[in-house]
Image (cartoon, grey):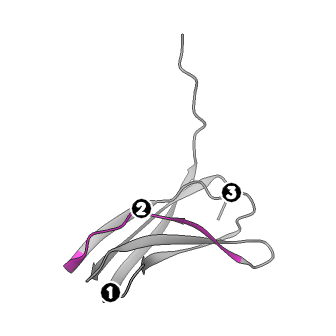
Amino acid sequence: ATAGHRYRVSGWYKSTTTPRFKAYYRTATGAWTYWAQGPLLPPSDTYQYAEWITPQAPEGAVGLSVGLALDRVGSFTADDFSLGELGQASPLQAPRR
């Protein structure tokens, strides 16, 4: 992970309940810290494609772990995950007058 950068995570899932992407980052001391989560995804009996773009990685992040998770009891299957770096987010520019 690189501080200030955003990442696109995607994968296929089927679930009896609502999964969501969750992300953790690792610090230089090796500690894993909860970072962010995506919106709830709809349940599905067939495989559905899902994609989420993380917020900017925090200062001190040296590693990244992401996946789909359930917040409540249910059946869940996931496949074909992908993780890619989007790069550093552009600073907001002030409107011209």
Residue flagged by tag 3: what amino acid is it?
Answer: Ala
| Local crowd size for mark 2, using a 10 Å CA cut-off: few (<14), some (14–19), many (≥20) | some
| Local crowd size for mark 1, using a 10 Å CA cut-off: few (<14), some (14–19), many (≥20) | some
Q: Secondary structure at mark 1?
A: strand
In this figure, which residue is indicated by the disc labeled 3? 3
Is 24 magenta? The answer is no
Q: Secondary structure at mark 3?
A: loop
| Residue 58 position within the rendered picture, expressed as x and y whole percent measured from the top left | 67, 58
| Residue 32 position within the rendered picture, expressed as x and y whole percent measured from the top left | 68, 77
Q: Which residue occupies 61% across, 37% down?
A: 91
**Along the viewing direction, whichever of 80 and 69 lies nearer the viewer:** 69
- Image quadrant occupied by the C terminus: top right
**Boundaries of the magenta span:** 32-47
**Along the viewing direction, whichever of 48 and 76 lies nearer the viewer:** 76
Q: Which residue occupies 60% across, 72% down?
A: 24
* Contact flag, marks 2 and 1 (Cβ < 8 Å): no
In this figure, which residue is indicated by the disc labeled 2? 52
Q: Is 6 rendered above or below residue 64?
A: above
Q: Would residue 18 appear left or right of 5 to someone viewing this image?
A: left
Q: Which mark is residue 76?
A: 1
Which one is earlier in the sequence, the residue at label 2 or at label 3?
A: 3
Is 43 magenta? The answer is yes
| CA separation in Å, label 2 and label 1 | 18 Å
Q: Residue furthest left?
A: 45
